[in-house]
């Protein structure tokens, strides 16, 4: 018996079912006509949670947030034309940070391309410089062979985006009208429909790395020999979503070798209940002291995670002759200084474990080295000064807010840090805490676009209280995202630092250029954020003191609503406060002759 079908619908449904069987749980969609088959297939599939955003740019970043928080591939769907280009910023960020996204763009059929058809652009491998894989399955074909091929390509897409080429992948779907389910294009045998509905439960469990094999690798042996020889070593943990395994093994390695761990505030190592005795969080401040940094000359540096946030550490690495090795799952080269010896592809926890095994056998244990003590001493001095300066600082400023947030944040909260000063200030001022706080950022390409959307995506999939620390321009940039906060009643506490423009530029030499500087760089706007937030149905508070902040913040994070706590700051005053901190650290280290 033959059954009437619409081939586009059958194709799209097969696609979505296969995604679900591969473990995809979330999708972010935007409206349009050409993507009708895909949209319907997602909308009718109850095993996938679909969010709808009018603005594709916001949709892309929202999906990025969903994928970051769940570490699973998230589908994005949009129509043809400029809509596809709106996704580009989020794709770039996902590419740079290796966040798994399955980007699905709808396209015109081949006969309508390149001849002025409406809403038609060249979508062939559109994101080619920032995508891990591209596929165009061609027009839908309602036969078992073509459907089988489609399913295979979907499994490939998910495997690549999650494991073998982790990051965003792009599938461009051409569709020829009609799109609606009841407009039939074909009659097919029942076995075609049955085949389309069957799903192969692919084995997409986390890859297991074989540590015994690793110890046989010559480069692991080389690094272990160097570490056994050198007493002066540093472990750097850059931005990354390191889990328990790594934190434990890295702590053990640090302890065995007597190497301090310079932990970026977005590496997850500053927060949690693990042993933090060798975790150093004030390195940015003490390395800015020329006097101190000149005398700290490590022989070896082992670096995990992406490029570090700290300028002080970056300058130090530029001038440092230590043998530096970069270790991450894909061997990505995170080294703006160009001085690293090598970048090796290895899962960081397995790497540490292999070294720990080697050192256990060799009975190496230098827990209390003079080297480690020197660095810990500088850390203690800097931390003490930091506390003193922050405690006596006047309201408002952009430095103290970091500790205020950490103090008031509930255990197991997420904190998303906007680019520009928030992520930097967090790195300078966040001290280690036992609270299990997970830190997120968009430092892949460091855009100030899509930050709120990303935070909303994180909140929507993590189910944890989520906090966003953001400047006024970045907040303005992504106001469109607030519509989805209202629609989905997303819980998000936004701490908005409003210095009326780009405060970051105050630290640049261009800041001496008066009106031109103000008009072309700072770009003040005098926006009334209260009116804007209210228009989107959010709760708004103008914060006028630290005590009030604590009260409002605690109330907001428990509310399951959109809350914006605005603090009106002065960028120049905050610049002065940061400089005071760095100068006092320098003076203290000079006076103490700690070396
Ligand atoms: C998409 C994008 N456009 C421009 C920039 C350049 N940029 C970096 S920081 C910044 C100003 C950000 O201002 P705000 O969010 O208010 O933070 P503040 O500097 O005041 O801390 C700009 C325009 C960027 N990083 N990304
Ligand atoms: Mg600003």
Image (cartoon, rainbow, N blue to C red):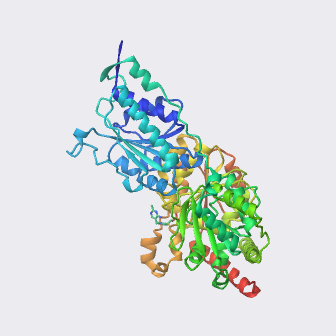
Q: Quadrant of residue 425?
A: bottom right
Front residue of this view, candidates 4 and 373: 373
Q: Residue at x 73, y 63 (%)?
A: 359
Residue 283 place in picture, x, y as percent: 67, 73
Front residue of this view, candidates 96 and 119: 96
Report the residue that reaches farthest toward the left: 115
Left or right of 16 in this view: 237? right
Query: Is residue 346 positioned above or below 388 on the image?
Result: above
Which quadrant of the figure contains the C terminus? bottom right
Residue 388 place in picture, x, y as percent: 75, 74
Which quadrant of the figure contains the N terminus? top left
Left or right of 449 in this view: 218? right
Residue 369 place in picture, x, y as percent: 77, 74
Left or right of 274 in this view: 503? left
Report the residue that reaches farthest toward the top: 1
Left or right of 80 in this view: 240? right
Residue 349 place in picture, x, y as percent: 65, 55
Q: Is residue 477 visible?
A: yes
Q: Quadrant of residue 36?
A: top left
Query: Is residue 548 positioned above or below 314 on the image?
Result: above
Front residue of this view, candidates 562 and 332: 332
């Amino acid at each position: 018996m033959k059954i009437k079908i619409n081939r586009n619908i059958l194709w799209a449904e097969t696609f979505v079912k296969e995604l679900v069987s591969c473990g995809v749980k979330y999708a972010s969609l935007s409206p349009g006509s050409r993507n009708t088959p895909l949209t319907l297939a997602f909308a009718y599939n109850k095993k996938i949670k679909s969010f709808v955003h009018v603005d594709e740019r916001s949709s892309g970043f929202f999906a990025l947030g969903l994928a970051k928080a769940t570490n699973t591939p998230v589908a994005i769907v949009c129509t043809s034309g400029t809509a596809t280009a709106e996704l580009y910023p989020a794709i770039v960020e996902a590419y740079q940070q290796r966040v798994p996204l399955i980007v699905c763009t709808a396209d015109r059929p081949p006969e309508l391309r390149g001849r002025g058809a409406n809403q038609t652009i060249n979508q062939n491998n559109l994101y080619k410089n920032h995508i891990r894989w591209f596929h165009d399955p061609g027009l839908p074909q309602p036969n078992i062979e073509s459907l089988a091929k489609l399913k295979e390509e979907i499994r490939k897409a998910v495997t690549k985006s999650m494991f073998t080429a982790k990051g965003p992948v792009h599938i461009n779907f051409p569709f020829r009208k009609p799109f609606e389910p009841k407009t039939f294009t074909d009659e097919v045998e029942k076995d075609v429909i049955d085949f389309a509905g069957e799903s192969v439960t692919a084995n997409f469990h986390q890859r297991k790395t074989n540590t015994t094999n690793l110890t046989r690798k010559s480069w692991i042996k080389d690094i272990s020999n160097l570490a056994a020889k050198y007493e002066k070593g540093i472990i750097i943990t850059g931005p990354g979503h390191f889990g328990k395994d790594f934190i434990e093994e890295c702590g053990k390695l640090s302890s065995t070798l007597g190497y301090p761990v310079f932990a970026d505030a977005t590496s997850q190592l500053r927060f949690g209940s693990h042993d933090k005795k060798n975790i150093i969080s004030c390195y940015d401040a003490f390395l800015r002291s020329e006097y101190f940094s000149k005398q700290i000359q490590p022989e070896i540096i082992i670096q995990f995670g992406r490029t570090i946030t700290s300028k002080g550490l970056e300058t130090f690495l530029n001038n440092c002759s230590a043998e530096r090795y970069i270790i991450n799952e894909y061997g990505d080269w995170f080294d703006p200084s160009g001085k690293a010896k090598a970048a090796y592809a290895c899962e960081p926890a397995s790497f540490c474990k292999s070294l720990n095994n080697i050192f256990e056998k060799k009975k190496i244990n230098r827990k209390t080295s003079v080297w480690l003590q020197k660095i810990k001493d500088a850390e203690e001095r800097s931390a003490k000064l930091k506390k003193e300066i922050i405690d006596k600082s006047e309201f408002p400023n952009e430095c103290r807010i970091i500790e205020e947030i950490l103090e008031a944040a509930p255990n197991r909260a997420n904190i998303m840090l906007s680019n520009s000063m928030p992520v930097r200030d967090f790195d300078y001022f966040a001290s280690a805490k036992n609270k299990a706080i997970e830190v997120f950022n968009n430092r892949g390409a460091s855009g100030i676009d899509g930050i709120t959307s990303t935070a909303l995506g994180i909140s929507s999939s993590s189910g944890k209280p989520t906090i966003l620390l953001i400047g006024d321009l970045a907040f303005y940039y992504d106001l469109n995202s607030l519509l989805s906060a209202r629609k989905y009643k997303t819980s998000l506490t936004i701490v908005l630092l409003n210095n009326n423009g780009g405060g970051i530029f105050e630290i640049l030499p261009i800041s001496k250029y008066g009106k031109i500087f103000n008009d072309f760089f700072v770009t003040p706007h005098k926006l009334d954020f209260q009116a804007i937030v209210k228009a989107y149905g959010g709760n708004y508070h103008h914060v006028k003191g630290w005590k009030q902040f604590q009260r409002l913040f605690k109330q907001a994070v428990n509310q399951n609503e959109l809350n914006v706590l605005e603090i009106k700051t002065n960028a120049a005053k905050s610049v002065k406060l940061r400089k005071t901190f760095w100068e006092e650290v320098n003076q203290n280290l000079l006076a103490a002759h700690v070396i």
